Image (tube, grey):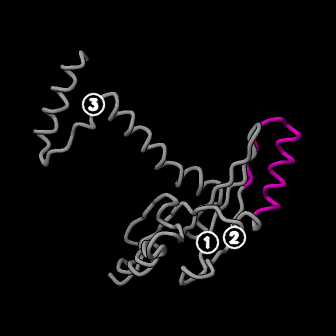
Amino acid sequence: MRQAAHRRSGRRRGDAGGSRADRPDPHALMHWCETNRADYILGLARNARLTRAISVSMQQANEQHQATGRSARVFQELTYRTRKSWSATRSVVAKAEVLPGKTNLRFVVTSLSRQDWVARALYEDLYCARGEMENRIKQCQLDLFADCTSTATLENNTGRRARAAVRSGV
């Protein structure tokens, strides 16, 4: 029973807005997760310090792109702490990507163990999965008129979707 009590209580995934320094108490979600033993993986807004920290990875991605003419991604794990807002140093996974005509830097902060997740898998398979799920939900909303679901009950929302579909000729 004690072992079960020490297990993580869930996983939270979010976008960069939740970890931006210009929002009130930007580390509140991370702190809550750490306090309640819930893992998290959150998008982290790019800044000059993070960009400098992955300059070698960015150079490697650029060299791979130059050699092949194709998109290239390099992932890097690092530890990071904001100068003011974070209460602790945290693990960050960075993606340095070079596409034809542009670069794409992305960062996620996580509580997940480096022993359990390789940087690429953590970013692509875990973090990006939610974005893909959101795309499918949006597609469903648009295709099935599921945006007409503002009432409190399933029956009323189902009726609203059906009436919207009939009106549109679906």
Q: Quadrant of the N terminus?
A: bottom left
Image coordinates of residue 159 in percent, x first then y, are 12, 32
* 101 left or right of 112 in image: right
Disc number lying in front (1 or 3): 3
Along the line of sight, the residue nearer the viewer: 25 or 1: 25
- The residue sitting at 43% across, 76% down in the picture is 28
Residue designated by label 3: 145
Residue designated by label 1: 91
Residue designated by label 2: 78
For disc 2, the neighbor class at 10 Å (few under 14, some 14 to 19, many from 20) is some
Number of residue marks: 3
Image-quadrant location for residue 102: top right
Relative to 142, residue 152 above or below: below
Q: Quadrant of the C terminus?
A: top left
The three-letter amino acid code for the residue at tag 3 is Phe
- The residue sitting at 59% across, 62% down in the picture is 45
- Circle 1 sits in a helix, a strand or a loop, which is it? strand
In terms of sequence position, does the residue under pointer 3 or pointer 2 come before the other?
2
Relative to 58, residue 81 above or below: below
Between the C-alphas of marks 1 and 3, the distance is 40 Å
Magenta highlight: main SS = helix
* 162 left or right of 108 in image: left
* 84 left or right of 104 in image: left
The three-letter amino acid code for the residue at tag 1 is Ser
In terms of sequence position, does the residue under pointer 2 or pointer 1 come before the other?
2
The three-letter amino acid code for the residue at tag 2 is Leu
Task: Check whether the beta carbons of the residues at disc 2 and disc 1 lie within 8 A of each other.
Answer: yes
Between the C-alphas of marks 3 and 2, the distance is 43 Å
Q: Which residues are magenta?
A: 54-74
